Image (spheres, rainbow, N blue to C red):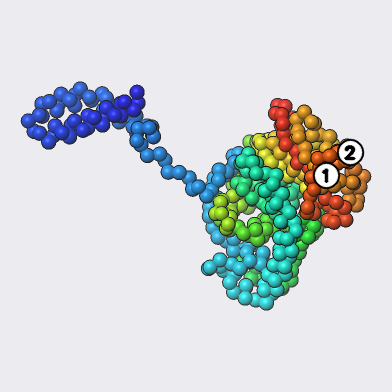
């Protein structure tokens, strides 16, 4: 009926035009106008109120096809694009700046050239081992569109932007959560005032050593590096990984959670409600290879039960990440402890896939009636001081046929014990629960 009204309007317009061309038909024209007055008014009102592609109207302009839908619930408004984060990240990551970089003069220093050469060697070595292994694993195990569309959720991540972005390069949204502060972006003026530029670059380079050499960040090293000694948080190492992975930083903003568990923009003067708070950053970046646009979020959260009880805002936020692909690696076996039951329950309730090493959620929580688990690599016992965390049911499962090889090293042990991964896919809906209980 609506299209008929609009078509009627078109017919009247055509009829009117024809009659205007013949002045002798003015009386007939008046009758036509009076006859169709109501129809004209209704058609005009409807035409302005709706858009009907079937009636020949133009559809709204399509979104940029290179930017995928941001799946994170209640994300802040679009990140304002500004090049300062990209310029800083490239300088500290040993990547030549783009034209017009304010760091061009400093890049000519011997200190920066030595910094670049060492990082180039480290990344080249990692490209042939860890990065190649993760890339091939992601291609073989996560070819399905559902995995590409999911939010990648990474609790206990530290600044490890490498694992999620190499294994899941096609996903639009990554959420990293850890205990370390989110940090701030230093200015050119601040970096230029460094009296010992070579020493500072050496220190920033060392922050990358653990993840490139061992595949994870060591907690005590992060305590020495990311609480003001080298940087004031994780923003810089995350940015460095992203630009080293052939991305351009389009912009960033400081964020926090509001009382409803929604991400909002944060002023730097904001004082968190708890000692560890919920301060974070949102980074928008574009792949240099395929021009796709992605969002990465980092939030500073203490994930034990006592702190989450005082932080229902984060519990609500985490519960909103439905259907996520969750990563757990080198977690210090936190989710093996009763005092981390809340975050463990949130992961099990909201994930469609969990990819983890044995430091993640204990094997017995993945019941066969709700999960299908594929094992990779070899598992004998945890490494070093975590040896007492042995899982006998996981040991037994690894003895059954069907375990696949894992042709790269990841997680604790870094070559002293065999690496392992478990890939759990949900086969039944999770039971409904109240995440704030």
Query: Residue 389 sits in which quadrant?
Result: top right
Q: Secondary structure at mark 2?
A: helix
Query: Residue 421 sits in which quadrant?
Result: top right
Query: Residue 22 sits in which quadrant?
Result: top left
Residue drawn where x is 61% and y is 52% of the image:
283
Describe residue 131's horizontal placement relative to residue 395 as left or right.
left
Residue in front for this viewpoint, 321 or 358 = 358
Q: Which mark is residue 396?
A: 2
In the rendered image, the vertical position of residue 428 relative to residue 96, given as above or below? above
Residue 268 image position (x, y, % from top left): 63, 52
**Quarter occupied by the N terminus:** top left
Badge 2: residue crowd in 10 Å (few <14, some 14–19, many ≥20) = few
Describe residue 394's horizontal placement relative to residue 177 as left or right.
right
In the rendered image, the vertical position of residue 55 relative to residue 295, given as above or below? above
Residue 217 image position (x, y, % from top left): 78, 55
Residue on which disc 1 sits: 358
Q: Which mark is residue 51?
A: none
Residue drawn where x is 83% and y is 50% of the image:
419
Residue drawn where x is 63% and y is 66% of the image:
95
The answer, for residue 185, to whether it is visible in the render is no
Q: Secondary structure at mark 1?
A: loop
Marks 1, 2: nearer the viewer? 2
Residue 195 image position (x, y, % from top left): 70, 73
Badge 1: residue crowd in 10 Å (few <14, some 14–19, many ≥20) = many
Residue in front for this viewpoint, 374 or 159 = 374
Residue 237 image position (x, y, % from top left): 69, 58
């Amino acid at each position: 009926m609506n299209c008929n009204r609009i078509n009627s309007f078109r017919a009247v317009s055509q009829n009117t035009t024809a009659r205007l061309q013949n002045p002798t038909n003015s009386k007939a024209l008046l009758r036509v106008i009076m006859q169709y007055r109501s129809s004209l008014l209704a058609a005009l009102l409807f035409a302005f109120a709706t858009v009907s592609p079937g009636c020949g109207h133009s559809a709204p302009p399509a979104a940029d096809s290179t930017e995928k839908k941001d799946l994170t619930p209640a994300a802040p408004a679009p990140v304002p694009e500004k090049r300062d984060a990209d310029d800083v990240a490239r300088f500290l990551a040993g990547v030549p700046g783009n034209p017009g970089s304010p760091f061009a003069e400093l890049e000519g220093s011997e200190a920066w050239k030595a910094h670049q050469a060492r990082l180039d060697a480290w990344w080249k070595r990692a490209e042939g081992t860890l990065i190649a292994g993760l890339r091939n694993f992601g291609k073989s195990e996560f070819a399905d569109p559902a995995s590409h569309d999911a939010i990648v959720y990474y609790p206990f991540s530290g600044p490890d932007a490498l694992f999620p972005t190499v294994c899941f390069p096609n996903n639009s949204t990554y959420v990293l959560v850890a205990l370390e502060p989110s940090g701030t972006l230093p200015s050119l003026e601040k970096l230029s005032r460094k009296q010992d530029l070579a020493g500072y670059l050496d220190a920033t380079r060392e922050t990358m050593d653990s993840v490139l050499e061992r595949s994870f960040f060591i907690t005590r090293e992060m305590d020495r590096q990311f609480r003001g000694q080298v940087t004031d948080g994780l923003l810089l190492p995350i940015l460095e990984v992203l630009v080293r992975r052939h991305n351009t930083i389009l912009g960033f903003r400081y964020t926090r959670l509001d009382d409803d568990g929604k991400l909002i923009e944060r002023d730097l003067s904001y004082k968190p409600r708890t000692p560890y708070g919920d301060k974070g950053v949102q980074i928008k970046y574009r792949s240099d290879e395929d021009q796709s646009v992605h969002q990465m979020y980092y939030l500073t959260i203490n994930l034990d039960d006592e702190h989450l009880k005082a932080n229902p805002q984060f519990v609500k936020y985490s519960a909103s990440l439905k259907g996520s692909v969750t990563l757990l690696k080198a977690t210090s076996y936190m989710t093996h402890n009763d005092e981390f039951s809340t975050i463990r329950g949130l992961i099990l309730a909201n994930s469609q896939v969990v990819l983890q090493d044995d430091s993640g959620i204990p094997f017995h929580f993945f019941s066969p009636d709700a999960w299908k688990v594929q094992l990779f690599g070899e598992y004998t016992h945890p490494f070093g001081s975590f040896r007492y965390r042995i899982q006998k049911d996981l040991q037994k499962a690894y003895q059954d046929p069907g375990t696949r090889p894992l042709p790269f090293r990841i997680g604790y042990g870094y070559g002293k014990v065999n690496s392992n991964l478990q890939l759990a896919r949900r086969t039944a809906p999770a039971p409904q629960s109240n995440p704030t209980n």
